[in-house]
Amino acid sequence: MTLVMVVDDDQDLAEMLGIVLTGAGIDVDLVSRGDEVMEIFRNNPPDLVLLDVMLPGLDGIEVCKLIRAESMVPIVMLSAKGDTHDVVKGLEAGADDYMIKPFKHPSELIARIRTRLRRANSGLSGQLTVADLAIDLVAHQVTRGGKTIPLTRLEFDLLVALAKEPGRVFTRDALLSEVWGYHHSMDTRLVNVHVQRLRAKVEHDPEHPELVVTVRGVGYKAGASSGS
Amino acid sequence: MAGSSIKETRFRNSLAFKVIFWAVFLSLGIISLTESALYAKISDGIRNVKVDSAIAESQSAVFNAQYRLILSQEPTEKTIQQIIDDVVVNSSTIIGSSVNGREVVLLRSGGNPTGSKNYQRTSNLVDPSSIPGSLRQAVRKSKKPESAEITISYLSGNKIPGLAVGQNIVIPKAGNYEMYLVFSLVNQNETLNLVKNSLALAGFILVLLIGLVMWLVVRKAVRPVQEAARVAERFTAGDLTQRMEVTSKDEIARLGNAFNEMALSLERQISKLESLSSVQQRFVSDVSHELRTPLTTLRMASEVIHAARNSFDPVIARSTELLVAQLDRFERLLEDLLEVSRFDADVAVLELVEFDLVTLVERCILDLSLLASENHVVVELSHQQDIVMVKADIRRVERILRNLLSNGIEHSQSPLIRINIAQSSSAAAVGIRDYGIGLDADDAFRVFDRFWRGDPSRARVRGGTGLGLSIALEDARLHNGELEAWGRLGAGSHFVLTLPKNSGEIIESRLIRLQPEDYLSTPMYGQ
């Protein structure tokens, strides 16, 4: 069974989330304080964390950083704030995705959670290379010169999406649908922030990216894969 | 022309200019009055001296001549002629060769014994007619010497200003004659000219100096005023920290202190108001946020119930549907309220991307196609260009378009909605035209008001928040664009969105006319 940790201080909402997720066949661990998260997380590692931004004890963004420091588990932030500032802060802290309360449909939440839990590109096998990066699609590992670069599942998916079709320019919308499973979101900030994070991990010089290249006015593409 | 008139206005509006202008103008008057009085005095003085000496000279000359004529023994015509020649030659000096040059004119007075010889003569070819009749009359009647200013004409044609002094003289056997001594006034006139020119020059310099001094004084006096005006202008422009520098203890300083006190109290008032309104906005924003969590729970609960509605009896099933629909509406209202509070708090920011407006409009039409077919509305799109690239906040532009289009579909009761896209080099526009119930011409201005309802007596149309159009307008304005509405009752309405191609630039013209071209303004339907 899949286990999702729901961190929200609103008892009623947490309970409701529990009902909906359990109904979808997902086990739920309810946590109501930010400062209790890490202990429970270590004792019973979940497959995904659903994390509210405003929490007593320790706020969601700090909790997100703590989880990210020791795990690549998918994190979906729940925010009552739709303001750019908060969303970007959450994403920069390491969240893979975010949902703004109230969600349109509970099914939307379930769909998002399933997308994040799904092993993306599981149909693919073998190796991909982007410049001096080796991407092992089976082991879900990215290595450079034999050294593993730790990537979150989402960052891995993003890199693979680009590397699968070297030279193809992906629009942000295309990436949103490919990697995040959105078919109708206009929020390209998600893509921008994650590209930044991916670059910070894989590029030699994130200021002058060579692996994930911006194509001005269009989107991104994987660079220099055939060159090496 | 325009430039010079601006300059004129600036001059006319300048305090310094006014003061200097009046100072120069008035001193010019005073100086010219003083100088002309001075000149009159000087010229009188010079003339009087000349006249006095001329009379004295003339008296002695005439006395001398008369004396010689009387004393001459056995006066014959020949001796008399000799004496007269002698007198004339002795009394005259050639004008021009000496400063006090003079001529002698001897004229017959009339009533002389018949047959007597005519001794009339002049020195140096002076024309006898130089002596005016009026002077001659005065001389004949008077015992004393008479004088007058004349113009001395020579037979050669020369004319010079002069002073004539005349006296009666009796020539034996030949009766009464008048003897005139004519003095040149060339020197005197030159002196007077010199005086006049000097006075004029002195006056001119004086006026210049007065102007200069006034300018210096006024500048010193006006500068603090100008400084005060500058500070006040900046203050008015919104910089509430502007204060006047007070360095002296004069009237300007009092003005400065008064201004600074006013500025301080204004600044306090404004910051008080600002903090009040930010508290208010903060409150709206907080309320909206706080409502979100319970709303999320409500929604999820209602969805769970809704999913099971098939097993309910019809009344409960319908109630569930209403519950879900109202939650939807509640949520939209909350969203709109939050958006409005962002606009009010001035924290709405544009996230600019480049995109094709045509594609976006097509997508909006596609998204709303279900709603359109439910309402039996046909949506037509026409555009001259296939691609209309703009740099704008796509989320906001989409929101404006969706809002206008869904409004048209749901509320206009029109069977047809026409969308038109146009562009110029700097702007792009979308016109959304319906042929439904339309708007009152006055209402076309009010549709953008918050919570405005078309007709208060009409039932509220389901679902709307009443904030959509006002948000759309704010969204358009945020791009420096414009959103305008036109409507006539029974003739439909027309909404035109004009956006600069690069957000923030100025839109110079309207690419789509607000009054639709397919609307014929006839008196019957118009207004």
Image: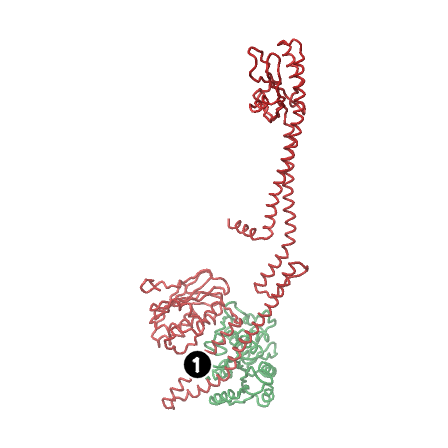
State which chain is coloured red.
Answer: B
Q: In which quadrant will I find the C terminus of chain B?
A: bottom left
Image location (x, y in percent) of residue A214: 54, 69
Q: As rendered, which of A224 and B315 lies closer to the eye? A: B315
Residue A85 sits in which quadrant?
Answer: bottom right
- Toward which corner of the image does residue B154 lie, by quadrant? top right
Instruction: Look at chain A in the picture and name its colour.
Output: green
Say which residue appears at 66% left-offset and 19% top-offset. Answer: B63
Q: Nearest the camera: B430 or B125? A: B125
Amino acid type at circle 1 is: Asp
Query: On the rendered structure, is B435 left or right of B73?
Result: left
**Looking at the picture, how far across and down is residue B347, in whole percent?**
54, 72
Give me the chain letter of mark 1: B
- The residue under label 1 is B328
- Image position, residue B490 (x, y; %): 33, 69
- Furthest toward the left, the residue is B524
Colour mapping: by chain
Residue A135: % across, % down: 55, 78
Question: In which quadrant of the rendered view does residue A7 lie?
Answer: bottom right
Can residue A126 be seen at all in this image of the molecule? no
Compared to A57, does B464 lie above or below? Answer: above
Front in this rendered view, residue B72 or B6: B72
A110 vs A144: above or below: below
**Badge 1 local density, few (<14 within 10 Å), some, or many (20+)?**
some
Judge whether residue B149 can be spotted in this image: yes
A77, above or below B383, in the image: below
